Image (cartoon, grey):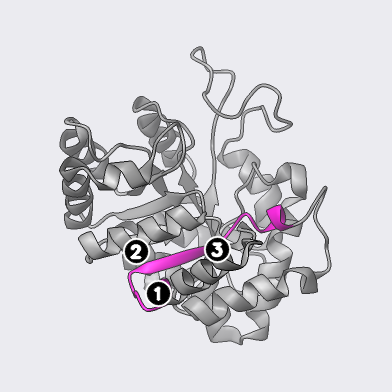
Amino acid sequence: MNRRIFLAVMGRTASASRSVPILDTHIHLFDPSRPAGVPWPPKTASFYRPTLPRHFRQVATPCGVTGAIVVECSPWVEDNQWVLDVAAEDPIIVGVVGNLEPDKPEFPHLLERFSKNKLFCGIRYGYLWGRNLRAELARPAFSAGLKLLAETGLTLDTANPSLPLLEDVVRITDLVPGLRVVVDHLAGMALPGEPAQRAAYRSLMRELGTRPQVYAKVSGILRLGTGSGPQNPSFYREKLDELWETFGSDRLLYGSDWPNSEPLGTYAQALDAPQRFFRTKGREAEEKCFWRNPQIAYRRSLRRHRKLLP
């Protein structure tokens, strides 16, 4: 029995015993007070402050969250080690998605180094830090790196949703069909307004729905609103229905995007619409989307914990 997940599950209060334990698959940790500072967030951000596991506990555990996966938000290689070290200090963190570049000559060495830590469950790549996933996919070295990632049993997270990125995910899963891919913040992607682009979007979503190795995060959802975001759950219903119809109960994951979500609403507000929606689908579906599916999508580090499910 893994101590980290055991403590997370057993830490729930008696009043929440009926509730499905929630694994948040998308949070960020950083500490601007470090001597080197941080590349993210900018000093102008309202959440420019240390955000560490203890701070996450304060906002998330009252909502029934029992564990989280950290998604690295720095392109600095050694920050992968920093976040692993910080995560090791608190059992509420059950996994880390790192930040490495698959096309770099040092990628095999770095992947071997970080994957020795069982919390390291994948990397994130896309259209961040000046990177261009479309251009990289044309390079054999990048494809070779993705194949090595798959062979190591790790997962690829994407950043950030757009029509080009969805096209890229189709291409990736053609090139490396054994690679599990998690599309981040798909709940926050606005529908294209131009008819041809909207038709292309619908077609891409249908195609991704046929690929069992592709998962979608119901994360970044408050980005659909303005200001603090509408708090009427029906505001989000169309998008949630679309994700459900595309990926079903087996390939949706919950993510808050904390603390990036703070300017748009509280942690409880970010969780509210997904939680209400999943509950309408029944207890089994709620367990899958909040707890079971992440253990499959990030199976290298989390699959051994399934027996602890209520």
Q: Position of residue 71 (x, y in %)?
A: 47, 45
- Quarter of the image with the N terminus in it: bottom left
Mark 2 secondary-structure assignment = helix
What amino acid type should be assigned to the residue bearing mark 2? Val
Q: Is residue 2 visible?
A: no
The label shown at residue 170 is 2
Q: Residue at x 40, y 46 (%)?
A: 97
Q: Earlier in the sequence, mark 1 or mark 2?
A: 2
Q: Residue at x 32, y 37 (%)?
A: 100
Asked whether the residues under the numbered discs 1 and 2 touch, taking CB atoms below 8 Å apart as contact, a structural biologist would say yes
Please identify, in this view, whether the residue under mark 1 or under mark 3 is nearer the observer: 3
Residue on which disc 3 sits: 197
Q: CA distance from mark 1 to mark 2?
A: 8 Å
Q: Is residue 221 magenta?
A: yes
| Count of number-bearing discs | 3
What amino acid type should be assigned to the residue bearing mark 1? Glu
Residue situated in front as seen by the camera: 215 or 191:
191
**Above or below — where is 230 with respect to 55?**
below
Which of the 4 quarters of the picture holds residue 189?
Answer: bottom right
Residue range in magenta is 207-224
Residue on which disc 1 sits: 207
Q: Position of residue 264 (x, y in %)?
A: 76, 47
User: How busy is the neighbourhood of tag 1: few (under 14 within 10 Å), some, or many (20 plus)?
Assistant: some
Q: Position of residue 187 (x, y in %)?
A: 60, 62
Asked whether the residues under the numbered discs 3 and 2 touch, taking CB atoms below 8 Å apart as contact, a structural biologist would say no
Asked whether the residues under the numbered discs 1 and 3 touch, taking CB atoms below 8 Å apart as contact, a structural biologist would say no
**Above or below — where is 278 with respect to 231?**
below
What amino acid type should be assigned to the residue bearing mark 3? Gln
User: How busy is the neighbourhood of tag 3: few (under 14 within 10 Å), some, or many (20 plus)?
Assistant: few
